[in-house]
Amino acid sequence: MKMGPLAGVKIVEMGGIGPGPMCALLLADMGADIVRIDRMEDAGLGVHTDPKYNLLMRGRRSVAVDSKSAEGRETILKLIEQADGLIEGFRPGVMERLGLGPDDVFARNPKIAYGRMTGWGQDGPMAKAAGHDLNYIALSGALHAIGRKDGPPTPPLNLVGDFGGGALYLAMGLLAAILESKTSGKGQVVDVSMVEGAASLMTTFFGLKAAGRWSDERGTNILDSGAHFYDVYETSDGEYVSIGSIEGKFYKLLLELTGLDQEELPKQMDESQWPMLKEKLAGVFKTKTRAEWCDIMEGTDVCFAPVLSLSEVADHPHNKARGSFVEIDGVLQPGPAPKFSRTQSEIQHPPCSAGQHTDEALSDWGFDAAAISDLKAKGAVR
């Protein structure tokens, strides 16, 4: 029996890449029953040689459907009739051309939350142009703000656009629309733009900029590596540690544990002295290994943590104690987040390959054996 907080919630996911699948993963881990609609030509194939490595596909079941055929379209609409939410990440107009746009869907299920994920949004002069995470966060202002002094902007993986400004905002928007529909009895479109999601994540910095406390010059501000007390430092063994001693009492402890004399140093918030103070700290941290600094600082109020690689994170005692990472079929991966005290989340299924669960999922969603056989015979599903 599913125990997650979204147990009983049903979602149809139109197969895509990146932020849409990440949103589906999050909802599936929290107990939602998600059927992913994959293309017929992808049936039996995975992005990787072995589907078990395609972690964004975990937690739901895949049905391979010919969405361009009348029978395939009708199959998708019958699934949608039963769903609380829909996830689609195509360019504007694609779902409409398939006969699966909002008007078509609301005619069959007027209560559904219709989640649309794009980079630029559903309208505007760039709406139909191709793009990727880097382009979306560039337009939002986020990319310009990330990087070191006198260097170019640094791509922060695809965390800010695809997953932060995209997947998380779609998950939040879908759940809000589903909750509202319980009261109103009406569905609605959730239009998620990764540009706008990334910009929303930058809200604090727009406020600081307006107040004259944030510069457009990278690497000169308190949180962008400009401050000596908020940065990463190399250790004697070529590893790194992170320091976030922003508050005065934490900064005082940093100086004590590094052996620097606070009385002989400039004031912490004297920005003109930050480069010099950073050099001092860099020299100190190069005198010991990462493990030695962990012995000195880990668990204190310095606001300290070692910079761990993907190969190291699961072995850290804190992550072990929390069960933050799990191993499934020999593949290490992050466990469900967040944690719930009563309705615990869990990984429902290993990563799916296209069409892997066509019979099983259709049966569970109300299609009888004869109907499934007929759909296969007509080439509508595989």
Image (tube, grey):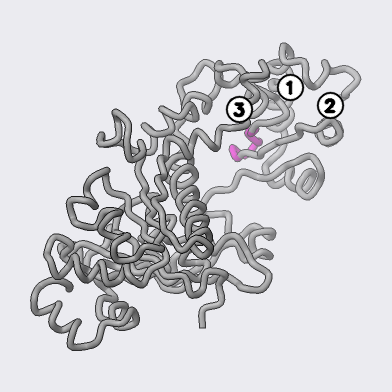
Q: Amino acid at mark 2?
A: Leu
* Residue 329 in sight: no
The region drawn magenta spans: 232-239
Residue 260 is tagged as 2
**Mark 1, secondary structure of its residue:** helix
Percent across and percent down for residue 344 are 60, 72
Q: Residue at x 88, y 23 (%)?
A: 262
- Whichever of labels 3 and 1 marks the residue nearer the N terminus, that label is 3
* Residue 323 in sight: yes
Residue 205 is tagged as 3
Q: Is residue 237 magenta?
A: yes
Percent across and percent down for residue 282 are 68, 27
Q: Is residue 120 left or right of residue 300?
A: left
Residue bearing the label numbered 1: 280
Is residue 188 placed above or below 161 in the rendered structure? below
Q: Is residue 187 left or right of residue 371?
A: right
Q: Is residue 308 left or right of residue 318?
A: left
- In this view, the residue in front, 141 or 178, is 178
Task: Identify the residue at the far left of this view.
Answer: 378
Circle 2 Cα neighbour tier, 10 Å, few/some/many (<14 / 14–19 / ≥20): some
> Are the residues at dot 2 and dot 1 in contact (C-beta closer than 8 Å)?
yes
Distance of mark 3 from mark 1, alpha carbons? 28 Å
Percent across and percent down for residue 111 are 41, 63
Is residue 190 placed above or below 74 in the rendered structure? above
Of badges 3 and 1, nearer the viewer stands 3
